[in-house]
Amino acid sequence: MKNNNKKKIKIPKGSNILEGSRAVALTVANIEPDVVSAYPITPQTHIVEDLAKFKADGKASYEYVRAESEFAAASIVVGASATGVRTYSATSSQGLLLMTEVIFNMAGLRLPIVLTIANRGVSSPITIWNDHQDAMTVRDAGWLMFFAENHQEAVAQHLLAYKLAETLNIPAMVNIDGFILTHSYEPVIIPTKAQIKKYLPKYSPTKGSYLNPKEPMTMGSFARPAYYQEIRQSLQDDLSNSIDLIEKEYKKLQKTLGKDIATKDSSALIEYYGKKKAKTVIVAMGSVVGTIKEVVDENKEVAVLKLKVIRPFPYKQIIKNLKNAKKIIVIEKAISLGNVGPMASELKSALQGKTPAKIYSIIAGLGGRDITKKKINKIININSQDTNKAIFIS
Amino acid sequence: MKEIRVHGRGGQGVVTASEIIAISAFKDGFFSQAFPSFGVERTGAPIEAFARIDTNFIRTREQIYNPDIVIILDASLLGSEAVKSGVNNNTKILINTTLNPQEIIKKYPNLKNKQNSLLTIDATGIALKILGKNLANTVILGALAKQTEIITLKGLKQAISEKFSEKNQEIVKKNLKAVSIAYDK
C-alpha cells in the first residue's frame, strides 16, 4: 500500500503480528504456570494446542496434563492449585458449561486459578461461533471476570488476572471473543518473562493455605448452616471490595510494563469513549466496542461505555459515566431468556434512582451474527416506549 | 484503509492467504488485520477471509462488505453472487485462472461491466510446477503484490518465511520461488 499522505505510522515498538490465540498462549507461557490442563474445544483450541506444542518442543517447564473432558481438566486444575502452584486452563461454550460445577468450587475453595474463555454461543442449536452466553451463565460463580476488546487488552488482562487472583485468592477469567479475537491477526506486544517477573513474581502462597502432606489439612469441608452463609459472604465481600485493588494493580501494571503493553485506558474497569456527557451512550463489552468506536467517531452525539470488568460489578464507575445520559443502549451478545440481556438488568439495577434515562436492552451478534456499523447506527435510533423488553437486532 | 476479501474453497488456504496479506503489510510498516469469515473450513465449501491495511490501528471487527480488492482462488466461484457482493467500479478482482479477462466475461456474463477491474494469474499452473501440488494461495499473492501494489514482494517474502517458519525449509524455499515467478509474470 502507498502511504499517500506520508503520515508517520506509529506502530508501538516491539509489536509483532500474531493470531489472538497465539498472543494469549505466548503470554501464558511467559507467566510460567506450573500446571496447564485443558480439553480442546472450538474456538479455544489454538490456545491450548500452542501451549501443548511449547511444552513438547521443550520451550516450557509446566506440566501439561491432557484431560478426557472439560470437567476433568477443571478438576485437575483444582487439584494442582490446591497444592499451592500456579495453574491455567482455557475453554469455550459447552466446555465451560460442563466445567460449571467445578467453576463454583474453584471460587468457593478460594483457588487463584486463571481461565481464558474463547467466548462462543451455547447449544441448542449447535453453534461454534461467538457470543457471550457462555460467560454470562457463570457470572454468579464468584470469579473476577474480564472482557477484552483486542489482543493487547487480552494480554494485559491475563497479567492482571494472575496478579489479582493470587492476591485475593479468587479465580479470574479473561473473556476473548471466539474467532473475532482468537482467530484474527493484528499487531500485539508480548511481554517477556523478565518483564512479567517485575510485575508478577513467582507465586508463593502463604504456608498453611495449601495442601501439604507434611502438614495435613482439609479444603472445601462440609459447612453446616451455622457457618455456610458467613463463608459465602466473605467471598462476596472480598470480590466486591476488590474494585480499588484492581485499579491499583492496573496502574502498577502500566507503570511497570508501559502503556503499549498494559494498554492506555485510565481505568481497568471501564473505558468511556466519545463526547463527554453525551445524551446517548451505548454500553457494550468485548471486541464489538472497536466497531462501535468507529460509529462514535462518525456520530459526535453518541459515546460508548466499555465494560472491561463485570465481576466485581463496577457500579460506581458506571453511574459516574452514565448519569448525564438520556438514552442508554446496552448492546449484548447474551440474553437471560424470559427477561432482558443480563448486563441491561444489572445496569438498570445500578442506575435505579440515579437517572431518568431510558435503558434499552439490545440483543445482537448471537451465534456469530456480524454486528456491523450499519446495525449499530440503526440501534442508536431505536425509540421504543417499552424498555422492559429485549430488542433483537438481526 | 484498504480492505481485501479472499474467496475460495475449504482446503485451498483462503484463511492463510488473508493472514499472509496482513503479515506482509505489517512487514511493509503498516497496521493490518486478518480474520476468517466463519473460521471453520470444510473441504470444498466456499470460504471467505478478510484482510485490512491502514496507517492507524484497526479497531473495526465487522466483516468486509465493500472490498477494495477481491481475490478469487477458485474461478468456479465466479458465478456466485457472494464474490460480487459490495464490489464497486474501483474494486480490483484478482482471479486464479488460465483465462484472460475477455474470456472470463464470456463465461461469466454477470461480470460484464467489470472488464477493467479484472486481473488474472494462472497461480494453479505455477503452483503445480513449483510446489508440485495445487496450492495457489501463496502464489496468487505474488500477483497481488505486482498488479495492485497493496503489499510489496519483499514484505510478502518475509511474511511467507515467518508464517511457514515451522514447516520444512524446502517448502518455504519453493513458496518464495513460486511467488517471485507470479510477481514477474
Image (cartoon, coloured by chain):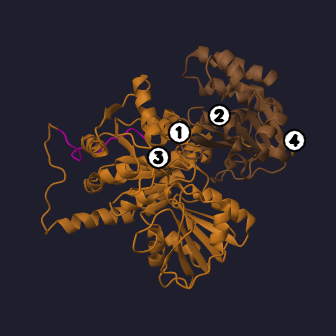
Which corner quadrant of the image does residue A331 belong to? bottom right
Separation of marks 1 and 4 at Cα, in angstroms: 32 Å
Q: Chain of mark 4?
A: B
Separation of residues labelled 3 and 4 (CA atoms):
50 Å
Q: Are marks 3 and 4 on the same chain?
A: no
Circle number at residue B41: 1
Spatial distance from mark 2 to mark 1, Cα to Cα? 14 Å
Q: In the drawing, what numbered circle is on residue B116?
A: 4
Mark 3 lies on residue: A158
* Foreground tag (2 vs 1): 1
Element carrying mark 4: helix
Front in this rendered view, residue A319 or A243 = A319
Coordinates of residue A236 in the picture (x, y in percent): 32, 65
Task: Please identify which colour was used for chain B in the image.
Answer: brown
Res. A7 in view: no
Looking at the image, is mark 1 or mark 4 earlier in the sequence?
Answer: 1
Which residue occupies 74% across, 35% down? B95
Residue toward you, B18 or A127: A127
Report, in whole angstroms, how far the alpha carbon at label 1 lies from the one at label 3. 29 Å
N-terminal of the two: label 2 or label 1?
2
Question: Disc 1 marks which amino acid?
Answer: Glu
Amino acid type assigned to the residue bearing label 3 in the image: His
Q: Is residue B56 above or below residue A243?
A: above
Compared across the picture, whether B25 is left or right of A80 comes to right
